[in-house]
Every structure is written in C-alpha cells, then in structure tokens.
C-alpha cells in the first residue's frame, strides 16, 4: 500500500473507505432492528467541506484485520458510541454515482494530524438526495457494528 | 389510499357514537360531512368501523390544531428558556422529547395507545445520550408537527422505523423486501421523500420535496402495493 500519497490525491479505485454512522442515521424497522443506513448519513454539515471517511487499505500494512484497525482509528479520534455502525464502500462505486447534472463524487486523501487515514468524499452530487440514497442503498451496503469489534 | 377506505389506528374498545351524532372527530366539523368507513386491520389487531370524516374536512382542522399546539411552549420549555445558558445536553434532549410527547398527548384521542407508547419509545431511543452524536440537533418541534400531520393524512397501518437527521428532522422509513420508502419531515408541512425500488437485480430511485397536502396522492402507488399498509 502506497502511503506516500499526497493530500488531495484521489484514492485508488479498487480501495475502500469506511463511514461512521451513528444510531440516529441507521435505518431500522419499527421495533428497532437495524437493516441499513439512511441517506441522511451522507449529508454534509454546514461547515464541512467534504464527508469524512477513513481509508481502509491505509491500515493494511502490519494489521491482520484492516477493517478492525480502521474502526479503532475512528475510536481514537472521535467519540464513537457503542450503537454506531460503520459502512464500507468501494471508491470506484462511489465515483460512478452521478446526479442529474452529471456531477459525481470523488474520494480524496485528506490526512489530519490525528488521523493519517482520513479521507473526504466531495462533489456536487452529494447535494442530491437520490445520490445520497444510492450511497446508502447500493454502495455502503456492508456494515460492521461497533459493538462487534473488540477494543 | 382512497379516502373512503382510510384506516384509523383506533382500537376496537373505543366508544363509537351512533350514526346520527358527531364522531370522535366531530368537534372539528359538521356532522353532515361524516361518513362511516369500513376499517382495515392492523396486523394482529381488529378494528371496528369508525366514523371518519372526509380527510380534506377534519384533517385540515386537525392539522391546524397540531400547528397551534406546536407553537405553544411546553411548561418545561418556559423554565428552560429562563436559564438558557445552563442547558446541559441531557436537558436539551429531554426538552426535545418532552415537547413531542406533549404534542402527541393533546391529540392522543386519535392515536392507538400501544402505538403511542411505541412512538415514545422510538423518540426516547433516538435521544438517548448513550447514542447521541455530538453536533446533532435534537428533534425540532416543527418537524415533529409535520410528522404527526402526515400520520393522520396517510394513516399507515405499518409502523415505520424512525431516525433523525443532523438538523433535527424526524425521518421515517418503511421497507417492503428490498424496497424502501424514506420520508424526512421538514418544517412548514413539507416533506422530502425518496423511494428505492428493487427491479431485476438493480435499483431505481425516485425522490421529491413537496407539501404534505400532495403526499397522499403521490404515494398512492406505494400504498396500493402495501409499502405502508392498507
């Protein structure tokens, strides 16, 4: 895994990113059984330049379980609640999503001082509800429960 | 979702008035506009026929009542605002759910007791501090007001799952197999809805933002296919 990537570079198409989804943005039935994530999990907050995700393959070197290592990075840098889930999406599948104006979503490397795997999903398509619904129902379909990953 | 077949989530032990007198909702309209409709059946529960006014008569009055109630500060909110600087997160979360529950209680005669309790449980779960995401906005009263009005308008017989957007808008989802209908309740009686439809191994999506007055007609195909019940 090439860790010499520069800030702003696009992640490789065959790689994956992980999105933290809190309890309120999880899709569930009337009895509370989680069955996915809501499109609202991909809404940008007012001051956010892009959707925060962690680069899964960044954790491949030296970690037997890169996904678990990625989740531990989340725990180290954010206040992750036990009820959280993490959705995993492929970079190529993310880039295929376009809105009616043919705008797409790019996933770029954006490390921070606290999190070297931090990346951002950016693009005008994120303003489109159907694009966000596609992310929720067709791309980030593999979920890992925070409670299932040991400390 | 034809008006004559509107299903009320009213339990069978509710006292029903005779044909000639106003129904439970009679205080909101002229009794001559009322008709009796045969009720659908919520899964596992039987409902008896209930006098229900035409949706565009009593619904409008009920919607106005909900709007008026939502605009009133709750008793706890009055104390809350007096000392705004010391609001802990717990207090903010409590205030949000308390306000919603008070609003429900004031129109409780139109809601099944068990369903009301389930709704409260769902709201509590969304505002549990153990689950709360920093930076989120608690449930906004205006969004909840739109949600309640939508419930009375659509009269779904299948309870939705509930979520909350970062802006404090309530979100309801219904699933039918791989299909999903999601409605986000905005202020001022507007909704943002999106449907994901599984089709030959692929997905189709359709979405719109619209006033709730148009929602019933627009969601009719989904209702007819049983997405939100009969």
Image (tube, grey):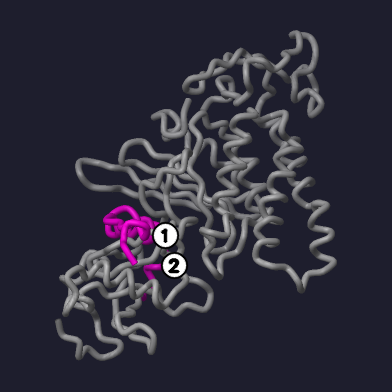
Residue A36 coordinates in the image, percent (x, y): 36, 50
Is residue A103 in view?
no
Residue B44 coordinates in the image, percent (x, y): 48, 20
Residue placed at 75% from the left, 18% from the top? B23
Residue A144 lies in the magenta stretch = yes
Q: Secondary structure at mark 2?
A: loop
Q: Nearer the viewer, residue B211 or A136?
A: A136
Residue A129 coordinates in the image, percent (x, y): 42, 59
When the figure is inspected, residue A23 is found, relative to residue B25, above or below; the finding is below
Q: Main secondary structure of the magenta part?
A: helix
Q: Which mark is residue A84?
A: 1
> Does residue B66 appear to the left or right of A17 in the view shown?
right
Circles 2 and 1 in contact, beta carbons < 8 Å: yes
Q: Residues within 10 Å of mark 2 (few under 14, many from 20)?
A: many
> Which residue is denoted by mark 2 in the rendering?
A80
Magenta stretch bounds = A122-151
Q: How many marks?
A: 2
Q: Chain of mark 1?
A: A
When the figure is inspected, residue A95 is found, relative to residue B52, above or below; the finding is below
Residue B200 lies in the magenta stretch = no
């Amino acid at each position: 895994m090439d860790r010499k990537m520069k800030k702003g570079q696009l992640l490789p198409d065959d790689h994956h990113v992980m999105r933290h989804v809190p309890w309120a943005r999880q899709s569930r039935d009337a009895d509370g059984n989680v069955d996915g994530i809501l499109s609202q999990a991909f809404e940008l907050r007012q001051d956010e330049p892009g959707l925060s995700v962690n680069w899964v393959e960044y954790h491949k070197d030296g970690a037997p379980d890169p996904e678990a290592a990625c989740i531990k990075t989340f725990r180290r840098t954010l206040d992750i609640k036990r009820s959280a889930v993490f959705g995993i999406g492929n970079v190529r599948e993310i880039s295929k999503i376009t809105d009616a104006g043919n705008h797409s979503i790019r996933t770029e490397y954006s490390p921070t001082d606290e999190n070297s795997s931090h990346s951002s999903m950016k693009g005008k398509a994120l303003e489109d509800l159907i694009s966000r619904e596609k992310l929720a129902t067709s791309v980030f379909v593999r979920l890992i429960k925070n409670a299932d990953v040991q400390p | 979702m034809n008006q004559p077949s509107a299903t009320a989530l009213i339990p069978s032990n509710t006292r029903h008035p005779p044909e000639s007198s106003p129904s439970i909702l009679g205080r909101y309209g002229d009794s001559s506009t009322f008709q009796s409709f045969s009720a659908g059946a919520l899964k596992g529960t039987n409902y008896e026929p209930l006098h229900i006014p035409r949706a565009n008569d009593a619904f409008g009055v009920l919607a106005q009542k909900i709007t008026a109630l939502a605009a009133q500060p709750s008793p706890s909110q009055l104390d809350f605002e007096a000392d705004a600087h010391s609001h802990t997160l717990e207090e903010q979360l409590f205030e949000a759910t308390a306000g919603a529950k008070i609003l429900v209680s004031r129109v409780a005669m139109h809601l099944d007791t068990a369903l009301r309790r389930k709704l409260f449980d769902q709201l509590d779960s969304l505002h549990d501090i153990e689950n709360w995401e920093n930076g989120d906005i608690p449930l906004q009263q205006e969004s909840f007001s739109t949600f309640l009005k939508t419930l009375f308008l659509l009269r779904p017989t299948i309870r939705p799952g509930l979520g909350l957007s970062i802006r404090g808008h309530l979100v309801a989802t219904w699933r039918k197999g791989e299909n999903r209908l999601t409605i986000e309740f905005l202020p001022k009686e507007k909704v943002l809805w999106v449907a994901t439809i599984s089709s030959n191994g692929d997905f189709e999506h359709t979405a719109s933002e619209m006033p709730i007055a148009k929602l019933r007609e627009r969601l009719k195909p989904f209702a007819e296919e049983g997405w939100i019940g009969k």
